[in-house]
C-alpha cells in the first residue's frame, strides 16, 4: 500500500491556498520561507522569478515523504521588475508606470519531493487601462496594493482596471493551477477535481 505524500505549502499567500482548494488539494501544513527577494544586478524578470521560487522552495524545512510547493509572481515592464511596493508612494509610481500599457506577469511554481525538483514558469501579458488621478487615489486608499507585486492584485478591486489578459488568469493571481496540478501529480498528489 502506497502512502499519499503530505503537501507543504511554502507560502503565506491566502490566494495560493484558495487556488489549491479549487484543485481539491489541502496542504498538510503551511510553512512560508523567508528569502531575500532583492533582484540581482542586471537580472531579467523571468530568471529572477525562477531563482526566487527555487530559493523559497529549498528554504522550507521538509521531512522525508513531504512535498513542498512554492511560487513567486513577478510583474515586469520591459526588463524592469516591479516588486512589492514598500509604501503608497512607490505603489503610486508603479500604477502610473502600468497605466495604459501592457506588462508581463511571470509566475513560477516549484515542487520538491524526495525524488526531484520540478519547476514551471508561466508568462502572461496583462493590459492595464489608463488610470486617472482619482482611480489611483481611490485604489491606494483601499490598501489592496500592500504586499502585491506591481502594487495590484487582479482578483481584487484592481480587476476593474484590467480589460485584457493573454495567458493564465490563475498565474496572474499567484499560482498557475494547470501547471501546479501537473507538478503535484508527478509528485503523487492529486486533487479531487
Image (cartoon, rainbow, N blue to C red):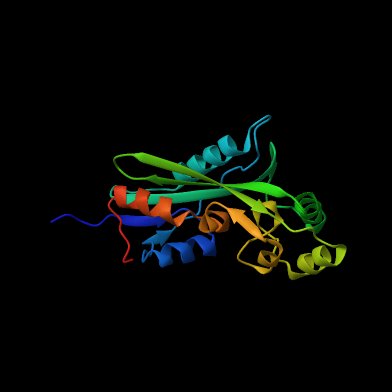
Residue 189 position in % (x across, y down): 30, 56
**Vertical placement of 69 versus 16: above or below?**
above
Residue 123 position in % (x across, y down): 55, 45
With 186 as the anchor, is 86 left or right in this view? right
Task: Give me the residue at 47% from left, 50% from top.
Answer: 70
Q: Nearer the viewer, residue 35 or 89?
A: 89
Q: Which quarter of the rendering shows the N terminus? A: bottom left
Task: Give me the residue at 53% from left, 63% from top.
Answer: 15
**Vertical placement of 133 versus 180: above or below?**
below
Q: Which quadrant would residue 133 be assigned to in this image?
A: bottom right
Q: Nearer the viewer, residue 51 or 120?
A: 120
Q: Which quadrant would residue 132 be assigned to in this image?
A: bottom right
**Vertical placement of 4 versus 82: above or below?**
below
Task: Give me the residue at 63% from left, 61% from top.
Answer: 154
Residue 161 position in % (x across, y down): 71, 63
Residue 170 position in % (x across, y down): 51, 58
Q: Return the residue found at the far left.
A: 1
With 28 as the anchor, is 149 left or right in this view? right
With 7 as the anchor, is 164 left or right in this view? right
Q: Which quarter of the rendering shows the C terminus? A: bottom left
With 28 as the anchor, is 76 left or right in this view? right
Amino acid at each position: 500500500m502506497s502512502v499519499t505524500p503530505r503537501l507543504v505549502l511554502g507560502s503565506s499567500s491566502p490566494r495560493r491556498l484558495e487556488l489549491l482548494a479549487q484543485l481539491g488539494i489541502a496542504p498538510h501544513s503551511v510553512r512560508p520561507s523567508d528569502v531575500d527577494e532583492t533582484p540581482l544586478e542586471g537580472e531579467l524578470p523571468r530568471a529572477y522569478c525562477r531563482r526566487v521560487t527555487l530559493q523559497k522552495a529549498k528554504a522550507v524545512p521538509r521531512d522525508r515523504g513531504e512535498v513542498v510547493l512554492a511560487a513567486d509572481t513577478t510583474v515586469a515592464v520591459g526588463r524592469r521588475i516591479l516588486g512589492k511596493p514598500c509604501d503608497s508612494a512607490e505603489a503610486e509610481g508603479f500604477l502610473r508606470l502600468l497605466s495604459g500599457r501592457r506588462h508581463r506577469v511571470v509566475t513560477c511554481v516549484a515542487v520538491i519531493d524526495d525524488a526531484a525538483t520540478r519547476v514551471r514558469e508561466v508568462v502572461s501579458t496583462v493590459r492595464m487601462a489608463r488610470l486617472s488621478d482619482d482611480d489611483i487615489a481611490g485604489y491606494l486608499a483601499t490598501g489592496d496594493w500592500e504586499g502585491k507585486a506591481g502594487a495590484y492584485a487582479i482578483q481584487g478591486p484592481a480587476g476593474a482596471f484590467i480589460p485584457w489578459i493573454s495567458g493564465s488568469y490563475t498565474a496572474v493571481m499567484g499560482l498557475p493551477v494547470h501547471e501546479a496540478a501537473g507538478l503535484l501529480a508527478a509528485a503523487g498528489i492529486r486533487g479531487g477535481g
